Amino acid sequence: MTIMKYILFALLLFGLWVTEPLWLKSNTNQTSSPIKTQITEQERQRAELIASEAARLKELETKFGPKPYGKYSTGVPASIYQYWERTLKYPDSLEEERCRPIRAGDKGWTTVCRYRVKNSSGSLQLMQDTFIIKDGVAYK
């Protein structure tokens, strides 16, 4: 019985050796396929797009200062909080809702923020303002 195992194993190896050209393809063709050419072209276009966006961002940052980033939960940049501290009559009553993504405008980085603030009668009033941020300082 043990000799039979070795004979079957030898036959299996022989069968694999004989059928090797069928399942082991050795492609020596060095030309690229149309799919590989298309993928290479897409990667090149993507690299060009990323480089142009980085150049544009660098140009805008030299013009307006570094791009401000907002809080994760509301998207409100720190410079707008400083603006609110300076200008609001009741800064402790501030409830910020959300700011839109920060974009480059003609005068600086712009964003639109919705917030609630206490008015003179004591009730909360919903406000929406466009803020311009240049060199880290926010104004309307």
Image (cartoon, grey):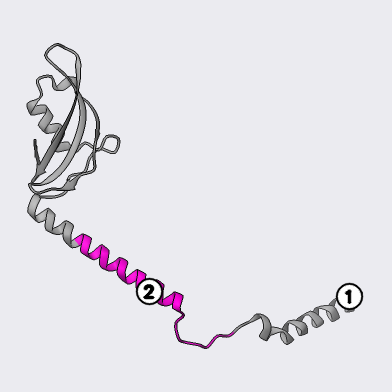
Cβ atoms under marks 1 and 2 closer than 8 Å: no
Q: Please, is residue 108 above or below residue 4 in the view?
A: above
Q: Please, is residue 29 above or below residue 44 in the view?
A: below
- Quadrant in which the N terminus is drawn: bottom right
Q: Main secondary structure of the magenta part?
A: helix
Neighbour class for label 2 at 10 Å: few (<14), some, many (≥20)? few
Q: Please, is residue 76 above or below residue 126 in the view?
A: below
Tell me if residue 57 is in the magenta stretch.
Answer: no
Tell me if residue 29 is in the magenta stretch.
Answer: yes
Rendered location of residue 7, percent (x, y): 85, 81
Residue 138's image quarter? top left
Residue drawn at x 27%, y 34% as measured from the top left:
74
Which residues are the magenta region? Answer: 26-54
Disc 1 target residue: 2
> Is residue 34 toward the left or the right of residue 44 in the image?
right
Q: Secondary structure at mark 2?
A: helix
Mark 1 to mark 2 CA distance (whole Å): 56 Å
> Is residue 125 toward the left or the right of residue 40 in the image?
left
Disc 2 target residue: 40
Task: Name the residue furthest right.
Answer: 1
Residue 12's image quarter? bottom right
Q: How many marks?
A: 2
